[in-house]
């Protein structure tokens, strides 16, 4: 596969995009784990989600 005179630019661009995508995936997974830990901590303290409350409360 001949990429011509711009081969280094094309390969570098694809590599950079791949690094950014992998970085975003790692960030999302780490944030998800952090949010899960925070949620478990709050639930252990007795603080529940709003959606778990009864529908009769106005606030």
Image (tube, rainbow, N blue to C red):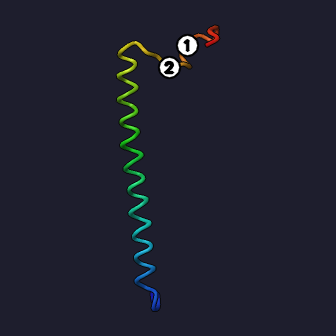
Few, some or many residues within 10 Å of mark 2 (<14, 14–19, 20+): few
Q: How many marks?
A: 2
Quarter location, residue 36: top left
Residue 40 location (% of width, % of height): 37, 23
Element at label 2: loop
Q: Is residue 55 above or below residue 31?
A: above
Q: Which residue is mark 2?
A: 49
Quadrant (top left, top right, bottom left, bottom right) of the N terminus: bottom left
Residue 11 location (% of width, % of height): 41, 78
Few, some or many residues within 10 Å of mark 1 (<14, 14–19, 20+): few
Element at label 1: loop
Q: Is residue 45 above or below residue 2?
A: above
- Contact flag, marks 2 and 1 (Cβ < 8 Å): yes
Q: Residue furthest bottom?
A: 5
Q: Residue furthest front?
A: 59
Quarter location, residue 34: top left
Q: Which residue is mark 1?
A: 53
Residue 16 location (% of width, % of height): 41, 68
The residue under the point 40% across, 33% down is 35
Q: Is residue 32 above or below residue 52?
A: below
Q: CA distance from mark 2 to mark 1?
A: 7 Å
Residue 55 location (% of width, % of height): 63, 12
The residue under the point 44% across, 74% down is 13
Quarter location, residue 30: top left
Give me the disc on residue 20: none
The residue under the point 40% across, 18% down is 43
The residue under the point 42% across, 53% down is 24
Quadrant (top left, top right, bottom left, bottom right) of the C terminus: top right
């Amino acid at each position: 596969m001949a990429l011509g005179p711009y081969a280094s630019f094309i390969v570098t661009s694809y590599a950079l995009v791949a690094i950014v995508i992998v970085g975003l995936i790692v960030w999302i997974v780490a944030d998800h784990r952090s949010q899960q830990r925070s949620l478990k901590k709050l639930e252990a303290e007795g603080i529940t989600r709003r959606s778990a409350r009864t529908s009769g409360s106005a606030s």
